[in-house]
Amino acid sequence: MGGKQPGDGPERSPELLHFRAFEAIYRLGSLTAAAAHLGLSQPALSKSLASLRRYYGDELFLRGKLGMRPTARARQLYVGVADMLSIADGELRAQPAFDPVSSHRVFRISCSEVGAIHFMPRLIARAGQIAPGLRFEVVPMMSRHTESALANGEVDLALGAYADFGPGVLSQPMYEVPYVCLVRQDHPRVGETLDLATFCREQHIVASLPDRMHAFSRVEQAIIDAAGSAAITVRVHSLLIAPYVVAQSDHIFTATQHVARRVSIIPGLRIVDCPLALPPILVRQYWHSAQGSDPAIAWLRAQIESLFLGDLRA
């Protein structure tokens, strides 16, 4: 590459996250391992690396038999980057220790209605045992605003299944959930199983959430791809409305197993396997790197992990 020097062009100065990506790649020698370590997608990590390459006018890392090997310029940069991150994570961002026993902090968590039904009772019960002064607020799930809300501290944690946020949002996979179908108990054309041909002939109800990044947006498109747009005859704005419609009609509601189990307590509903080739959703907890050193949020993440990692309970 050419001899571009910092500041010679329009490329913005690197951000802290870009240097975190640099340090992780240098230390681990792998884009995949570095992305996993930082909780980033590999495209997000590659974007940070590309920004550094443009800024420094150097490849920084070359792919070889032993993985990503640093260039001479990268080796020069590494000591300064490591020192800078040490300061950023220590002296400059030090915060008081978090004592859950005595704290009266209000945690704000973003998730869907059904997500709140799943997560909050057990989280509140755990807090009641070990941190009785804590309070919680559940805020609407709106992913187009979630990244900025996490960055500026309006939201402490988001729980759900989203498409990728920006590189500043970190995440931890919690569990996978498959899709199923809800039908009324005495549906005249759906027996113990539901084949694709029957699925395509029936009428469907979908929850058209305003949050198009969320995994439920893929359900509507999958139904349209399989059965055509005319198959969707009812749209509602909430996951909790659709089951009541299904219980008193011949409509089919395709939802995650989590949602279906939660709402199947409504009289007149039953669950059948979904014939669509829909991959399971991956539920994660999300937080922002700008708040990553907050010990209270770290404590909250640890409680979520302890209660729900690998969990599929309804």
Image: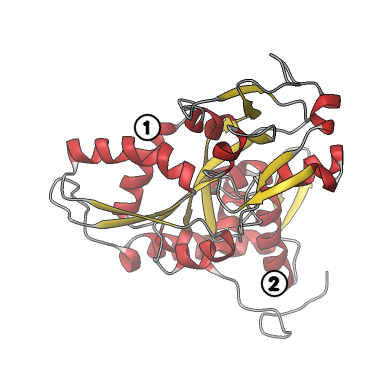
**Is label 2 in contact with label 1 (beta carbons under 8 Å)?**
no
Residue 28 as seen in the image, left or right of residue 124: right
Judge the density around disc 2: few (<14), some (14-19), many (≥20) Cα neighbours within 10 Å.
many
Residue 145 in the image: above or below residue 299: below
Q: Can the viewer see residue 175?
A: no
| Residue at the farthest left position | 102
Residue located at (59% from left, 56% from top): 21
Q: Is residue 207 above or below residue 306?
A: below
Q: Secondary structure at mark 1?
A: helix
Q: Which mark is residue 3?
A: none
Instruction: Say which residue appears at 56% left-offset and 31% top-offset.
Output: 260
**What is the distance, in whole Å, between disc 2 and disc 1 at their CAs?**
44 Å
Give percent across and percent down for residue 60.
Answer: 71, 60
**Image height check: is 11 above or below 116?**
below
Horizontal side of residue 62 vs 211, given as left or right: right
- Compared with 54, 303 (above or below) is above
Q: Nearer the viewer, residue 271 or 201?
A: 201
N-terminal of the pair, mark 2 or mark 1, is: 2
Q: Nearer the viewer, residue 50 or 296?
A: 296
Q: Which residue is mark 2?
A: 56
**Residue 304: where, in percent of width, then height?**
38, 39
> Which quarter of the rendered picture does the N terminus lie within?
bottom right
Q: Is 312 left, or right, of 87 in this rendering?
A: right
The amino acid sitting under disc 2 is Tyr
User: Mark 2 or mark 1: which is in front?
Assistant: 1
Q: Residue at left 28%, top 41%?
A: 124
* Mark 1 lies on residue: 307
Q: Residues within 10 Å of mark 1 (few under 14, many from 20)?
A: some
Look at 70% across and 79% down and name the residue there: 11
Q: Which amino acid lies under the numbered mark 1 shown in the image of this protein?
A: Leu
